[in-house]
Image (cartoon, grey):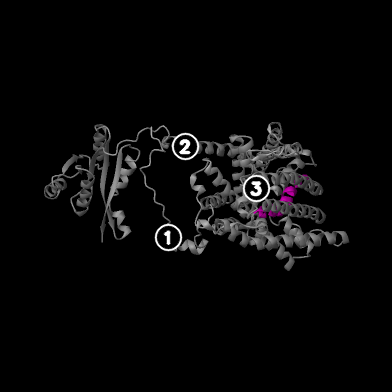
Amino acid sequence: MINPKENRDTSLIHRTAEQKPRRTLSHYLIGRPLPTADAPHETIGKAVGLAVFASDALSSNAYATQEILVILAAAGTAAFGYVFPISIVIVALLAIVVISYEQIIHAYPNGGGAYVVAYDNLGKSPALVAAAALLTDYILTVSVSVSSGVAQIVSAYPHLFEYRVPIAVACVGFITLINLRGVRESGAAFAIPSYFFIVMMFLTIGTGLIRVFTGSLGTVVNPPEIEHFGEAISGVTAFLLLHAFSSGTAALTGVEAISNGITAFKEPRSRNAGITLIWMAFILAFLFLGISFLTREIKAVPSEAETVISQLARTVFDGQDMPYLLVIIGTTVILILAANTAFAGFPRLGAMLASDGFLPRQLTFRGSRLVYSYGIVSLGALASILIIVFQASVTRLIPLYAIGVFLSFTLAQMGMARRWWRIGQLEKRAAQPAEAHGEMTYDRRWAVKMISNGFGAFCTGIVMCVFAITKFRDGAWIVLVLTPTLMGIFIWIKRHYSNLASRLSLENYGEPPPYHVRHRVLVPISNVHQGTLAALRYARMLSDDVTAVHVSMEPEDTEKVRRKWEIWGRGTRLVIVDSPYRLFLEPLLNYINEILSNRQPNEAITIVVPHFVPENRLHNALHMQTAEMLRRELLSTPGVVITEVPYQIP
């Protein structure tokens, strides 16, 4: 066995590379590369953090009320009066979820949200369920928010309806590009549109409420044709109300994003993230309740031809003048930029899963702008595929949406409830109540907090079940199938990395093989020329046991090779393999396999292949890629090394 403490033969030299990346087209698109030392300076404050992480939750106000109406419309316009009571229940649920995530932010300051909470308190399987649900939700967040933003454009300009899919895909590409520039730059770019939306919606709701109380607010003029989802029914039923409630819970999507991206905030990051979460909750609650209340008052109707926000704005401002256009612009921009919340959360969660071995390790790589570039690009591509498949229809995408969010909500709160129970047990083992055990510290209010989180888990669990039942036929079954499928993929990737690590581990490795072994070198040749001789010279540098191999397909060509070899081969052994059927690779591989089957212990075999490198790369297509073919065939063969000897041809 090797004792690492006694193995001091290796010298260590530590250098810092002075080379900087060469300027390329990507520098103009995403900015100059940033050194790793700049990472602490790429964090964001509360104001920018609200724009980055809360845009999804805030933008859901643009379609959550409409989605409630879409379901209620099945029972006729008389059912629209339930939209405000349903919204009140949803806001109460929002308060429960926000209290839980406020605790998560302070308990787990390194981010990860529901995944980390579940892993730490419930185990690997629940954590993978939460991770699968969150990743699915982030992809759907981009698809739904961008599609809803494009729907606002179509409301103002109906002739663009047939172009909504390419417009939506182009918007996803634009947001992907902006996020590749870095968290700080993308946050600064999205801050102004986000706050513009908040100001315009506060102005719209405030004006609408004043007109309601003064009795000057009318109803929608020339409302669009009512659209409803599912079959028409004769009256309001409990199932219909639950169905509408589950659609409206889309307003809560994005609440978890801040807990996943705590590391993006400036220090003290937990405090800054927690304050941002509270800001977001109050703004979200006011906007959602205000829109739902005014929607009922103006008798707005659900329609893909004109959104509820459009009907509300033109009713409050008496037409489609400048205030109306500003509301539509602000709503459109925030809906499209709401996808930025997913772009802030998905790459970080993906990197965390990848570091734990459940996703490809490439997702942990930070690009030139210190962001997880592979995760950002992957999210953009997957969301674009969904937009194309579902034709940028918000109503068709919504059934896939919130079930994953509430699954992660439930697991997060269950995890926190168990964490508080574990903290409560510290009192029995601690010499003093304040003694800390690991990362947990005894808290005298642990029982209250445990009950709070347990009640929250119960509520969100009920909502998740309601959503799964009411939306099952509408498409929720896809998520119920996709989540275990993703879990299977996570486990398969983890098993691969674990097996690879065990095979590469130096634990119990024993003595390494001796460096001095028998070395046999094979040089495949098709002709004798300067490139062949360059490969032969290199082969003779490796070993004295060198064999050139020529596959004979035409006797005349083989005779020329033999005569030239007698002159230039310098006594090196030449093996000619006849190929009656003019095959090249198969006879060569058969000969190599014979050598491998008869090789001695500790004998290494190297195949040296001449490789022409023409000045014009297009000329590569005119030559056989022998080295590449051999590499593909012999890559999994132990004890064989394939070496290319480039020969530059000017």
Q: Amino acid at mark 2?
A: His
Q: Secondary structure at mark 1?
A: loop
Q: Which one is closest to the eye, mark 3 or mark 1?
A: 1
Q: Nearer the viewer, residue 513 or 537?
A: 513
Secondary structure under badge 3? helix
Residue that protrudes farthest toward the bottom in the picture: 322
Residue behind mark 2: 496
Amino acid type of the residue tagged 3 in the rendering: Ser
**Residue on which disc 3 sits:** 259
Q: Quadrant of the C terminus?
A: bottom left
Sequence order check, earlier mark of 3 and 2: 3
Residue 97, percent across and down? Answer: 72, 44
| Closer-to-camera residue (249/114) | 114
Q: Nearer the viewer, mark 3 or mark 2?
A: 3
Task: Give the alpha-carbon distance from disc 3 to disc 2, as whole Å.
Answer: 30 Å
Magenta span dominant secondary structure? helix
Let me know if residue 427 appears in the view: yes
How packed is label 1: few (under 14 Cα within 10 Å), some, or many (20 or more)? few
Q: Residue at x 56, y 37 (%)?
A: 487
Q: Are marks 2 and 1 in contact (CB under 8 Å)?
A: no
Image position of 522 with respect to 338: above or below:
above
As measured in the structure, the alpha-carbon distance from the residue carrying label 3 to the one carrying label 1 is 37 Å
Q: Could you tell me which residue is drawn at 53 percent across and 50 percent down?
A: 375
**SS under mark 2:** helix
Q: Position of residue 63 (x, y in %)?
A: 70, 52
Q: Residue at x 38, y 39 (%)?
A: 7
Horizontal side of 69 relative to 56 (left or right) equals right
Q: Which residue is mark 1?
A: 18
